[in-house]
Image (cartoon, rainbow, N blue to C red):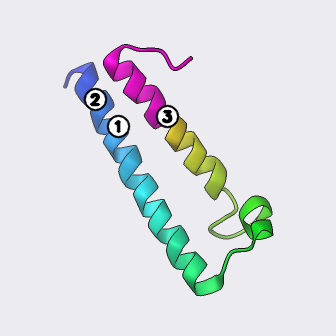
Amino acid sequence: MSDIAALKKEKQELIDKMLEMQKQFIEHEHQNGVSGKDYWASSEGLLADYRQEYMDMANRVVDIAHEIVGSNRL
């Protein structure tokens, strides 16, 4: 597998995981409601690391996209 193919595979896997996380978040929100405090300061359950994990994956997806096309993010 070429480097580009490996990057594309990694990017798709991250996107798939992000979509699954969104689905879980929406289900959680519909069942339990989510206050601003829950979203921003939750220390347990689904939301404990959700924002950071999602942001890290989203940033990696952007970095991979730039790497694939040979551009720089900054």
The residue at which mark 3 appears reads as: 60
Up the image or down, 57 lies above or below 68; here it is: below
Determine the secondary structure under disc 3: helix
Instruction: State which mark lies toward you, 1 or 3.
Output: 3
How dense is the environment of label 2, judged by Cα within 10 Å: few (below 14), some, or many (20 and up)? few
Disc 3 or 2, which lies upstream in sequence? 2
The residue at which mark 2 appears reads as: 6
How dense is the environment of label 1, judged by Cα within 10 Å: few (below 14), some, or many (20 and up)? some
Cα distance in 3D space between marks 2 and 1: 6 Å
Q: Which residues are magenta?
A: 60-74
Residue depicted at x 76% and y 65%: 42
Residue depicted at x 62% and y 68%: 46
Disc 1 or 3, which lies upstream in sequence? 1
The residue at which mark 1 appears reads as: 10
The part of the image, by quadrant, that contains residue 32 is bottom right
Determine the secondary structure under disc 2: helix
Cα distance in 3D space between marks 1 and 3: 9 Å
Instruction: State which mark lies toward you, 3 or 2.
Output: 3
How dense is the environment of label 3, judged by Cα within 10 Å: few (below 14), some, or many (20 and up)? some
Determine the secondary structure under disc 1: helix
Which amino acid lies under the numbered mark 2 shown in the image of this protein?
A: Ala
